[in-house]
Image (cartoon, rainbow, N blue to C red):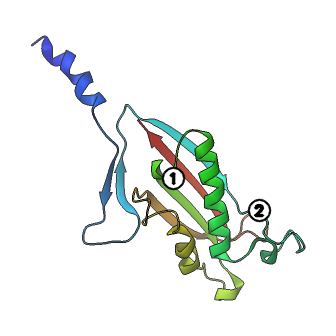
Amino acid sequence: MLLLPLLLPVAAGAQEIVRHKIPNSDFPIAQAVSVPPNATIHFISGQVPPVVHKERDPNSIAAFGDTRTQTVGVLQRIRDILQGMGLGMGDVVKMQVFLVGDPEHGGRADVAGFMAGYTQFFGGAQPNLPARAVMQVAALSNPGWLVEIEVVAAKK
Protein backbone atom coordinates (compact mmCIF):
# COMPACT_ATOMS: atom_id res chain seq x y z
CA MET A 1 0.00 0.00 0.00
CA LEU A 2 2.75 2.46 0.80
CA LEU A 3 4.55 1.79 -2.50
CA LEU A 4 1.66 2.93 -4.72
CA PRO A 5 2.06 6.67 -3.98
CA LEU A 6 5.79 6.33 -4.65
CA LEU A 7 5.23 4.65 -8.03
CA LEU A 8 2.67 7.13 -9.37
CA PRO A 9 5.14 10.02 -9.88
CA VAL A 10 7.51 7.66 -11.73
CA ALA A 11 4.71 6.54 -14.07
CA ALA A 12 3.60 10.13 -14.66
CA GLY A 13 7.21 11.14 -15.41
CA ALA A 14 7.44 8.48 -18.12
CA GLN A 15 4.54 9.92 -20.16
CA GLU A 16 5.24 11.23 -23.64
CA ILE A 17 3.51 13.77 -25.84
CA VAL A 18 1.06 11.75 -27.94
CA ARG A 19 -0.21 12.85 -31.36
CA HIS A 20 -3.47 11.15 -32.27
CA LYS A 21 -3.76 10.64 -36.04
CA ILE A 22 -6.98 11.22 -37.91
CA PRO A 23 -8.26 7.69 -38.59
CA ASN A 24 -7.88 6.55 -42.21
CA SER A 25 -6.34 9.88 -43.25
CA ASP A 26 -2.97 11.22 -44.30
CA PHE A 27 -4.06 14.87 -43.90
CA PRO A 28 -1.10 16.65 -42.24
CA ILE A 29 -2.69 17.54 -38.90
CA ALA A 30 -3.30 15.61 -35.70
CA GLN A 31 -6.86 14.92 -34.60
CA ALA A 32 -5.69 15.65 -31.06
CA VAL A 33 -2.47 15.98 -29.09
CA SER A 34 -2.10 14.82 -25.50
CA VAL A 35 0.49 16.69 -23.44
CA PRO A 36 1.55 15.04 -20.15
CA PRO A 37 1.83 17.07 -16.95
CA ASN A 38 5.63 16.85 -16.98
CA ALA A 39 5.95 18.80 -20.29
CA THR A 40 6.72 22.50 -20.45
CA ILE A 41 4.17 24.38 -22.54
CA HIS A 42 5.17 27.45 -24.57
CA PHE A 43 2.61 29.89 -26.01
CA ILE A 44 3.88 31.74 -29.08
CA SER A 45 2.04 34.94 -29.94
CA GLY A 46 0.44 35.34 -33.34
CA GLN A 47 3.04 36.02 -36.02
CA VAL A 48 2.46 37.92 -39.24
CA PRO A 49 4.34 37.88 -42.55
CA PRO A 50 7.50 39.83 -43.29
CA VAL A 51 7.62 42.31 -46.14
CA VAL A 52 8.97 40.56 -49.25
CA HIS A 53 8.76 43.51 -51.67
CA LYS A 54 10.07 46.60 -49.90
CA GLU A 55 9.40 48.81 -52.93
CA ARG A 56 5.63 48.17 -52.63
CA ASP A 57 3.10 49.98 -50.44
CA PRO A 58 3.62 48.54 -46.91
CA ASN A 59 -0.16 48.35 -46.49
CA SER A 60 -0.73 46.19 -49.57
CA ILE A 61 -0.83 42.49 -50.33
CA ALA A 62 1.79 43.19 -53.02
CA ALA A 63 4.29 44.06 -50.25
CA PHE A 64 3.77 40.74 -48.43
CA GLY A 65 2.98 38.31 -51.24
CA ASP A 66 0.21 35.80 -51.77
CA THR A 67 -1.13 33.43 -49.11
CA ARG A 68 1.52 30.76 -49.80
CA THR A 69 4.36 33.29 -49.58
CA GLN A 70 2.92 34.81 -46.42
CA THR A 71 2.42 31.38 -44.83
CA VAL A 72 6.06 30.43 -45.45
CA GLY A 73 7.25 33.77 -44.04
CA VAL A 74 5.11 33.40 -40.92
CA LEU A 75 6.20 29.80 -40.31
CA GLN A 76 9.85 30.77 -40.78
CA ARG A 77 9.36 33.44 -38.10
CA ILE A 78 7.76 30.89 -35.79
CA ARG A 79 10.60 28.42 -36.49
CA ASP A 80 13.16 31.12 -35.60
CA ILE A 81 11.33 31.99 -32.35
CA LEU A 82 11.16 28.32 -31.39
CA GLN A 83 14.85 27.77 -32.20
CA GLY A 84 15.70 30.72 -29.96
CA MET A 85 13.89 28.88 -27.17
CA GLY A 86 15.68 25.58 -27.82
CA LEU A 87 12.62 24.13 -29.58
CA GLY A 88 11.72 23.11 -33.12
CA MET A 89 8.69 22.85 -35.36
CA GLY A 90 8.27 19.25 -34.20
CA ASP A 91 7.46 20.60 -30.74
CA VAL A 92 4.37 22.47 -31.98
CA VAL A 93 1.28 20.77 -30.54
CA LYS A 94 -1.46 23.32 -31.37
CA MET A 95 -1.82 25.87 -34.17
CA GLN A 96 -4.44 28.50 -34.87
CA VAL A 97 -4.40 30.00 -38.34
CA PHE A 98 -6.21 33.19 -39.33
CA LEU A 99 -6.63 33.69 -43.08
CA VAL A 100 -8.07 36.79 -44.73
CA GLY A 101 -10.13 36.39 -47.87
CA ASP A 102 -7.89 37.01 -50.88
CA PRO A 103 -9.26 39.34 -53.59
CA GLU A 104 -7.53 37.07 -56.15
CA HIS A 105 -9.74 34.21 -54.92
CA GLY A 106 -13.08 36.00 -54.93
CA GLY A 107 -12.75 37.09 -51.31
CA ARG A 108 -12.32 33.52 -50.06
CA ALA A 109 -9.34 32.36 -48.06
CA ASP A 110 -6.71 30.69 -50.22
CA VAL A 111 -6.58 27.42 -48.27
CA ALA A 112 -4.66 25.66 -51.06
CA GLY A 113 -2.00 28.39 -50.93
CA PHE A 114 -1.87 28.07 -47.15
CA MET A 115 -1.49 24.27 -47.38
CA ALA A 116 1.31 24.64 -49.98
CA GLY A 117 3.27 26.71 -47.45
CA TYR A 118 2.24 24.68 -44.39
CA THR A 119 3.37 21.35 -45.84
CA GLN A 120 6.89 22.71 -46.24
CA PHE A 121 7.08 22.59 -42.42
CA PHE A 122 4.63 19.83 -41.36
CA GLY A 123 3.84 16.38 -42.68
CA GLY A 124 6.93 15.73 -44.79
CA ALA A 125 10.41 15.42 -43.33
CA GLN A 126 9.02 16.74 -40.02
CA PRO A 127 6.31 14.20 -39.08
CA ASN A 128 5.16 15.63 -35.70
CA LEU A 129 1.77 17.09 -36.58
CA PRO A 130 -0.08 19.68 -34.49
CA ALA A 131 -3.76 19.87 -33.72
CA ARG A 132 -4.88 22.79 -35.86
CA ALA A 133 -7.72 25.18 -36.61
CA VAL A 134 -7.92 27.33 -39.74
CA MET A 135 -10.44 30.15 -39.91
CA GLN A 136 -11.23 32.93 -42.31
CA VAL A 137 -11.39 36.35 -40.68
CA ALA A 138 -12.66 39.65 -42.06
CA ALA A 139 -9.29 41.40 -41.72
CA LEU A 140 -6.02 41.63 -39.84
CA SER A 141 -4.52 44.90 -38.56
CA ASN A 142 -2.51 45.54 -41.75
CA PRO A 143 -4.57 45.38 -44.95
CA GLY A 144 -1.67 43.59 -46.69
CA TRP A 145 -1.66 40.64 -44.31
CA LEU A 146 -3.51 37.52 -45.42
CA VAL A 147 -2.06 35.22 -42.72
CA GLU A 148 -1.49 35.24 -38.97
CA ILE A 149 -0.53 32.11 -37.05
CA GLU A 150 -0.16 31.42 -33.35
CA VAL A 151 1.17 28.19 -31.91
CA VAL A 152 1.55 26.29 -28.69
CA ALA A 153 4.67 24.15 -28.33
CA ALA A 154 5.41 21.54 -25.67
CA LYS A 155 8.53 19.65 -24.72
CA LYS A 156 9.42 17.27 -21.93
Above or below, 126 relative to 26: above
Counting from the top left corner in percent of width and height, residue 135 is at 55, 68
Q: Residue furthest left?
A: 1
Question: What's under tag 1, amino acid-wise?
Answer: Met
Which image quadrant for residue 113?
bottom right
For mark 2, what is the residue? 141
CA gap, disc 2 and disc 1 = 26 Å
For marks 2 and 1, give the one nearer the viewer: 1
Residue at (67% x, 64% y) in the render: 73
Counting from the top left corner in percent of width and height, residue 82 is at 58, 46
Question: What's under tag 2, amino acid-wise?
Answer: Ser
Residue closest to the eye, 41 or 107: 41
Say the numbered circle drawn on residue 31: none
Above or below, 24 relative to 90: below
Instruction: Describe residue 58's horizontal placement relative to residue 31 as left or right.
Output: right
Local secondary structure at mark 2: loop
Local secondary structure at mark 1: helix
Say the numbered circle drawn on residue 89: 1
Q: Quadrant of the C terminus?
A: top left
Instruction: Describe residue 5's horizontal placement relative to residue 104 as left or right.
Output: left
Q: Quadrant of the N terminus?
A: top left
Residues at circles 2 and 1 in contact by the CB criterion of under 8 Å:
no
Counting from the top left corner in percent of width and height, residue 100 is at 66, 73
Instruction: Describe residue 50's horizontal placement relative to residue 96 as left or right.
Output: right
